Image: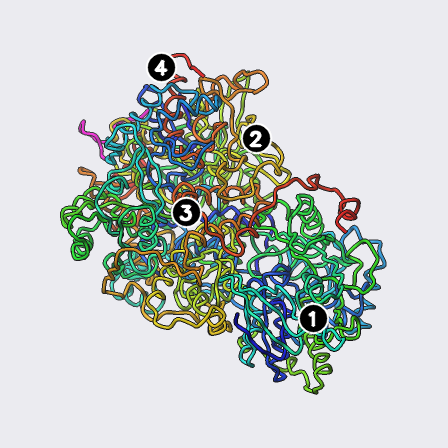
Amino acid sequence: MPTLETEILVIGGGATGAGVAWDAALRGFQVILVEKRDLTHGTTGRYHGLVHSGGRYVVKDPKSAAECIHENRILRRTHAHCIEDTGGFFVVTPEEAESDYPDRFQAACDEIGIPCTEIPVAEALRREPLLNPRISRVFEVPDASADSFLATHATVQAARMAGARILIYHQVEALLVDESNGQRRVQGAQVRDMVSGELVTIRADMTINAAGAWAGQIAALAGAEVRIIPGKGTMVAMNHRLVNTVINRCKMPSDGDIIVPIHTIVAIGTTDEKVADPENLRIEPWEVQLMLEEGEKLVPGISRARVLRAWAGVRPLYQENFTGQDSRDVTRSLALLDHPSRDGIQGFLTITGGKWTTFRMMAEKAVDRACQHLGVERPCRTADTPVPGAEQGHYWLGHRLHEIEEARLQGELVCECELVTRAMLEDAARNNPTVTLDDLRRDVRLGMGPCQGGFCTYRAVGILHELAAENRTAPVTPESPQEEIANSPWEVAYLQSPGRHVRTGSPQEVLESKVLGPASPVTDPRTPVSNPNLLLRDFLQERWKGVVPVLWGRQLKQERLDELIYLGVMNADHLPDEELASPLTDFYLFDTTPGETSPGTTPSGQEKEASA
Amino acid sequence: MHTISWHSVELTLDECIKCNICTSYCPVAEVTDLFAGPKYSGPQAQRFRENGQPHSPDHSVDYCSGCRVCNDVCPTGVRIAEINAKARAQMVAEHGIPLRNRLLGRNELLGKAGSFAPHLANLALHNPVSRVLAEKVVGIAREAPLPRWSTEGTFSAWMKRTRHRRLRSDKKVVYFHGCATQYYEPFIGQAAVMVLEQNGYEVLVPPQNCCGLPMLSNGEFDAAERYHRGNVARLAGFGLAGYPIVGTSTSCTLTLKEEAPELLDKEDPGSQALKQATWDIFEWLRELHAEGQLSTDFRPLSPDEERLVLPYHAPCQYRAHRIGKPALEILSLIPGLDLRESHARCCGIAGTYGYKAEKYPVAMDVGRELFDFVAAQSGAEITACDSETCRWQLEHGTHLPSRHPIEFLAAAYGRYDLERRRAVE
Amino acid sequence: MTQLIVIGAGLTGLMAAHTAAQAGLQVRIIAKGMGANHWHAGTVDVLGYHPRDSRQPVRRPLESRDVLVAEQPGHPYARVSPEEMQAGLEAFTRLAQEAGLPHRGSDEPGRNLLLPSPVGAARPAFLAPEAQLAGELGRDEPMLIVGFQGLRDFYPQLVAENLGKQGVTARAAFLPLSLVTRERDRNHVQLAKLLDEPERVAGLGRALRGLVKPGERVGLPAILGFQRHREVLASLVEQVGAPIFEIPTLPPSVPGIRLHTALARRLEALGVRIETGMEVLGFHGEDGRVLWVETETAARPLKHRAERFLLATGGVLGGGFQSDHTGRIWEGIFHLPLTLPQERSRWFRPRFLDPAGQPVFQGGVPVNGNFQPVDPASGQPVFANLWAAGNTLAHADPIHERSLEGVAIVTGVAAVKAMVGDRAPANS
């Protein structure tokens, strides 16, 4: 069994874990990060993308709001290219016309220092013509939206450049707990490589649990009780940008009261359901219905527009000694659990709660505490250290299209909906560890547009298969799967820029024909990407999982075309290698066991208590 | 900045299922790499455009000719050509409009200017030196088929001159002549008047101005809006009073019906009244025929007993009217006419597209399908098409004369001289 | 007055209009746009998998039809006798022949072909255009699958590897796309049109000759010519000296568009007008008869009067059915009753590739033995002069059971025969 040694072991490859690894590595620690799936596979990759100004929590949870505006300012510098500067509106809809909330909101913003300007309704309607014309007041705040996949990748690249090692698809099976000297001490973890099945031991001086909604499960491995309150939020993505500004309702945060423009879509969010299991990402029909009904109050007509997809993420909410019923009431502030003082367990910290917006601050607090325990004094540097790629400045909606046009790459598009070129896909697959096509989706937005993989799944499988065939003849074979993953270049600064992935000379200029020998399967057990049939099935199923909750109207028609392609033309349900499964094959199944089906059922009530 | 509403054509991008039928039929994408096809430039690119963006992300959409083959074949109803037109307007709003496009857009002004001294104007424009200059200086293709000013006065002047001969009747119809008939081809209007009068209708020609289409297709939306407002002010009342407004220019009638209100997001009652009252002349005659009211007192068009071979090309605007091919249906009533229906997608000219130096070769490549079709019809010595610019392009590409179907119809009534292109009264 | 208006220009509409024209009716087709022919493989799939046991492909669809009909008495195939089914398919074969695009079946009459899909799966089809026949997987010659470098819709190594796993000897090769075009952005239809030019075919032939080994057959993406497709294919076979076949791939389907174009031209030559860009918005009925349908235009609804109407708008994909987020699903023109649960939670199964298919796609318009839409309660026709055919019909999922074209052809022909009374009394 391979054994690795490090000073700090970070568990969790979401925004927080990546931030901790980055922060710790910048302070000169040896760092290893382990993540059981792909980076951002958990909550980070399943949120609506809002970079909070703090406005949303300014009345209810001012501590969290202050954290948000502080970090909002920093992230615009350190992660500039991952952020679109959409700005945000808080609008007073007719439902709240009589409320005193707007005045309290404005006062609270002033108090905390969130820039907040009331603008004329006509001005807001000019900028956002589809907004409800019956709104009575509009406040403008510095909300923004972020690509949380790219931001985490960029953070991880920065961490790697500072020396951190990142092991994805490595799941913690046990913590190494030493109980000698009458003292409990976590000394690292035993992790399983989910691809090869191999066990790896990682010894560490300090283990930082940044497993988010899974943090309770990790803490339990050390014998500590951490009662994460997993609050599931469901979001509905519309097919295109109906608004270009973040739209919030100016009231106490609740379900379906925010619309976030992110890349080519807008997301309506969210519900907040207390669930028992963070893997429970099931979307109930009433949740979709509720998002659309609430969305109507902000953008009348939205429920008749095309819905692209729905997804859910589980918030890692935490409040020591919380006894309430509604996860809405749990603080959004970050929580650093100091297990040495809290539970008498040395060498172990848990950082949880918080928002995506505050991930850097969470990391800072966690590593500050780690320094204390390790008896060193090293200042945090992340706030002044832009991650690679930040020099590009904020992204704007048209940037991909613009680069495609400038470099005339129209013929190179693999995912036509999201404008992913062949070279982008190849570079992402070459440079990033890739187990499923879903991993590439997070890298380059493959399959995230209207057809939901209808055309690009086949193309991506074919391209990866060609790459794998080339690699088969490549001379260098890494020592172990961990090495292979760790040694990938992971160049992500320009991951999403078509213009940065241009091959010299178009394929049309190639004049030589290429003859290949008899086909022998390109199957290397250590690189599952080499089985095209598994990749194809997994990705089709992964896309299916997220569209089923919203299949009607135009998206149902789209799905039927996708069926015609994969059943009628491809016969993909009768391909060889049916027995193969990836680490995520089961995860992609859509749970259709009957749940709450009646739309309009209030989310509070018995169901909720039962799951609490 | 043009605003959007739920009725805006841009929002039809939601209908797209990415199936590629449009791109497979697009005549422009087929002949040039400069245009990546309707799916790409329309519903796909539209997801990357927004109000108030730093700059238009894309420019290849300018190579869309607006022929609307895409709209016609789309199984789900995406208004692709209109999405493209709006994207072009956004580019114009940012970069300003080139002098050349401004000139091409000012059909009416040019027409009027040349009409003061048509001989001189024709001489000035139609000589090799000026055409080379026009290409070099403003970018108007030197080979492209520019019209000639009428040397016998405008259509309005003819109406005035012949007012004592015009039919008076309780049944009245308004005629929208458009700029081409007014300044270049008044005889088309004469043929229309002959046909309408043959059917017992008095023809009213109230003051009117350019429909604004040339400006719309060059992205000059503000100017187009002024023209459209003018026509609403002058004509909507006739519509409200129950008079049909018929036109011989398929592009003008389309603009009054749909292009102007839709691209300019006009939902006012005047625009709607004008829209409801406007008909393509053959669309209206087809209704008349369906009610048994159309005079079918036709005489054969060829003097000898031979059948007249007539290749007919329905202009792209008919596709946008979405009324089928009414001219074909009516012409087929004329005895002795051997109609040959073209299935060519587009003649290439697409309004003002083929006049632009950089697009002229594309337009000629697009038109090849039609020119080859005509060449393959043995015995054909003349062609028919409802749209003026398409006819000029057809003549340019086939070297055969081309006529408006209304000319054939008027001739079949014995009230028009097809050879000399003038009313017979 | 028009005697029959067919709504929909897919294979169902074309076959129905052809049958009507042959019966002497004056017939017009109106359609919103182009349909499923443009997406599918250009083959005629009659029954590829039995809906209840979809593991093994159906060997003899006309025989399996009897089993299917016994199990699913509402299936569209249950509305026709085996002889009518045969006759419908023969009518298609004749029409395709006349249109210049002959289709044939297996050398062993009545058997499904097994043809390579663009991922290298074996797809069952009953009839295929000439250009696909040499791909029959039951034949012995080893395969050379040839792709073009940079072509995004065809991956020869993938095809060869998967065929290899299924016991078919296959190897792969790439040719430079510059043999066909130097342009950077070309889809398959455009490439096919470029290959109408003989000098390009000659270049491709030379290149292929250098690749192929004696005894091999050659598979290429389906781009071998458009208008001159048959000449292109014949010329390549002659130059290369080996059997050559096309593999249809992602939409747009070149074989499908060739078929549509050829059939449409043939119908027009027979006097059938086909008008696209016409979306039917509604209808007017009186005394149990449809008097006219109305299409959307740039200004005002356009009335289309006819003595009879045939609904061939397809199902969810064809645009025949609309649905919304409340779980309502309806037929969009005549608001005909559908055999579908109005409840979204019952529309789907957990897997995209579920062997049983998705329930939402199995419902449709219920008809009587004469293909007239009926009120399920009374069993009586909804309108005396309305018929329906093809994928609008209830009790089949043609994409799942691979009967897309079979159902279209057989019911399109039979519905018109029922309409004109040229048919033995319906058995169900």
Q: CA distance from mark 3 to mark 4?
A: 39 Å
Q: CA distance from mark 4 to mark 1?
A: 76 Å
Mark 1 belongs to chain: A
- Towards the viewer: A175 or A243: A175
Mark 3, other Cα within 10 Å: few <14 / some 14–19 / many ≥20 = many
Q: Give x and y (percent) for residue B159.
A: 41, 41
Q: Residue at x 39, y 36 (%)?
A: C56
- Towards the viewer: A191 or A265: A191
Task: Identify residue for label 4.
Answer: C422
Q: Are marks 1 and 2 on the same chain?
A: no
Q: Main secondary structure of the magenta part?
A: loop
Residue C391, quarter of picture: top left
Mark 3 belongs to chain: B
Magenta range: B297-309
Instruction: Tell me if label 4 and label 1 are in contact, CB under 8 Å.
Output: no
Q: Amino acid at mark 2?
A: Leu
The total number of labels drawn is: 4
Instruction: Tell me if label 2 and label 3 are in contact, CB under 8 Å.
Output: no
Q: CA distance from mark 2 to mark 4?
A: 32 Å
Task: Identify residue for label 1.
Answer: A358
Q: CA distance from mark 2 to mark 3?
A: 33 Å
